[in-house]
Amino acid sequence: MAGNEQVKLDNGNQPQNSQSNLPEQRGKENRSGFCPKCGAYVGAFYRCPVCRATMPHGTKLRFMQVAIVLGAIFGLVVLGFYARLNPAPLVNIGDIGPTYSNGSVTIKGNITGIDFQVASDNSWRTLIFTVNDTTGSINVKAYTETADELIIAHNTPAIGDQCTVRGSVYVKGTDLYLLLEASAYFQPSRPLDFSLNATALESLFNATPADYLNKRAKVNGTVTFVGTDGTYFDVDGKVRVFFPDYVRQFSPSTSISVIAGDIVWVTGIISAYYDTLELLPATMFEIEITFHGGGLPE
Amino acid sequence: MIELSVVLLCVIAGLIGVVLATIFSLLPGLHIYSILGFVVLFLLSIGNVEPLVFSGFTISMLVGYCLGSSISAVFFQTPDDSSVFMVFPSQKYLADGRGYEAAYLSGFGAVIGGIIICLIALFAGPFLGSLVDLLAPHSVWIIITAMLFVWMSEWPKDPARQESRGGKLAAAWVQLLMGLFTILASGVLGIYLFFSQLVPPERSFQTIGAAFVGLFAIPSLIQNLFSAKRAPLQHYGKSIEGNFAELAQGVGAGIIGGSMGMFVPSLTAGVGNAFSRHAVSLSGDRSFMFSQGLARAVYYLGGVLLLFIPGVTIRRGGASLFITLFYVPETQGEFLVITATLIISAAVGWFFFAFLLKGITKAIHRINTRYIALIGLVVMLLLSYWMLGLSGILILIVSTVIGAIPLVFNTRRIHCIGVITVPMVISMAGFAPIITQLFGLG
């Protein structure tokens, strides 16, 4: 404690009761808050606690009460309309910084990376995907409940998707990401750039790879080879259809049984793995078997 | 390894912070988070900031705020969310010329609270982390129960003045229902704030600031502006009355109340105090005001220390949020430096607080508090506009009207804390998407 300002410990010596204020109230009868009849302190109440006289300020107070309640309701309605105008404004990814913390924003961009982490005992799951636009990139995270919701709704992300994501910005030190809280807030868009057969795609790609890389194509052809681990198959010996890990993780109960000789239509992103032209489907549902060939001749 | 120069800078920043915050907090209605928001913007714009120094500055600003706002809460009656319960007894003390005593007790409680929370963090740090982990899955029902208790435990004040039975019943329920209305209206405001983007996105870290000022401070400022009341001559004494029983009771209530705010998200010291008063059967104004100051310090400072305890790094409260915009502390050294800065700034802050309190006590009867309220009002409007633009003013107006409901219906002002508790419960319970759709924000 400062200087000579000591707490005096007097073992229960109580101060004078501040409520015993009758002497102080004398002569205050005409002041606001005091009863005009008996002089007792009434405060903002309608009636005097001593003589029960109605206080003159009662009408004014009632008017204020009604006005404030109506004002609060009106204010919330106005605020509600204002909030609905743009509940999550569209922002550039590069602009998102620490001061956006807890902000509700919408971003648009391309998905360039996906990671799906599952606890060894399956008690939690985290889906992380990276979204790029022309100004920068940001990770979007969906925790267990939202990740499950995305998988059940078949609304999972895939590399190459154009997407619109609404989420809350989370910042903790260098960790900055967008938290996805509902499946409806993730809207992927997969516009088709080409539709052609596997042989034509290979020749076009070999001529000008840059024009085709990362574009979405729908390719048809005959399955010529199926990988033993079930992660890929070849179409017409020209294009390899490869299922990324996340596609299999997002569709655990969906299996596509493709055998050599089947005629298929496959939609996916054009990619290159060393010298191999690849097509990466976004989900298992992008593989359509139009004819079951039952195996190719030896 | 932290360099000695950084440690010294941290302490110097702490000393500057506590003095500045004590002065700023004298301005009625000004919450220290509003000032820290501008500090954050400035530091982010210049870049290359030593985060530990900023952390020291932040925690000492909180110490200064706990001290300085004790003065403004007593002499200018402008509470924040954690001191709303203190205003009523301190008003009585001010009317009796004992404002010095009220502010002194609250400030003394804040310093003791700062020391206690440092000792707890130093010697029981890992336990605090385990306690937070233990409470986390139960947060939803704890918050709901707390809000129900705050609402249901309010004593109807008006019915005894009515003559008929119906009149008594109606008077009791009008007050209680308006308490419930305040919680719901604040909750709807919170839903708009948390689940949509009312403010410019680049200022999202200060979304809740304008609402808090409007709900808790501005109604009091307006009340003071139109009030004909003038503070009477205040008594300044070289000692104040109190006994060990009152202090012990205040320490118990303050630790319980502050800890609730510190450990359970969205519950502030104000809500925690509603419980702790019953838990320790707190009676008497002196122990009450002392416990309020102590609880606020435990709540505000404890929230920051939780972030610094190695292996815990839990974020509670706005100040922690500001610090984590720069970095996440990890080492024992950082924790010890921050704890030392807190204790040093509390010691220096106490002397500065006592000096200011003495001066204000002697001068308050000559000051027209209407002008102080007017200055506070103008400053808050300007700060809200600069930080959040016109949307900040809109939020301020709506929240002020909601914050005025408890004043005109004589119900508890802590009901306004629904602005955080309602959206937090919705979010934790997983109902955010449904509520968002329901309110047309999807």
Image (cartoon, coloured by chain):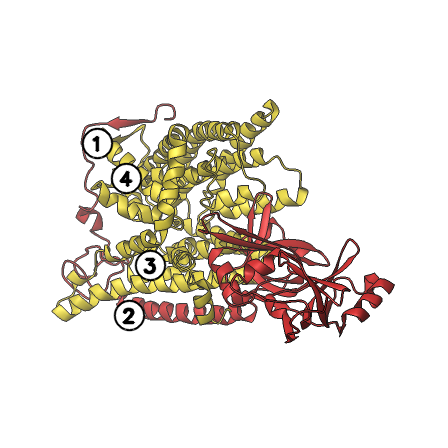
Chain colours: A red, B yellow
Q: Residue at x 29, y 34 (%)?
A: B251
- Say which residue label 1 marks: B245
Chain at numbered mark 4: B
- Amino acid type shown at disc 2: Thr
| Residue B77 shows in the view | no
Residue occupying the point 63% across, 62% down: A158
What element does badge 2 sit on? Answer: helix
Q: Mark 2 Cα within 10 Å, few/some/many (few <14, many 20+)?
A: few
Foreground label between 2 and 1: 1
Task: Determine contact: label 4, label 3, CB under 8 Å.
Answer: no
User: In which quadrant of the rendered view does residue B362 lie?
Assistant: top left
Mark sitting on residue B253: 4
Question: Which of disc 3 and disc 4 is earlier in sequence?
Answer: 4
Q: Check disc 3 and give the amino acid type.
A: Leu
Position of residue A281 measured from the top left corner of the image (x, y, whole percent):
66, 65
Q: Which residue is mark 2?
A: A59
**Residues indicated by labels 4 and 1 sit on the same polypeptide chain:** yes
- Circle on res. B407: 3
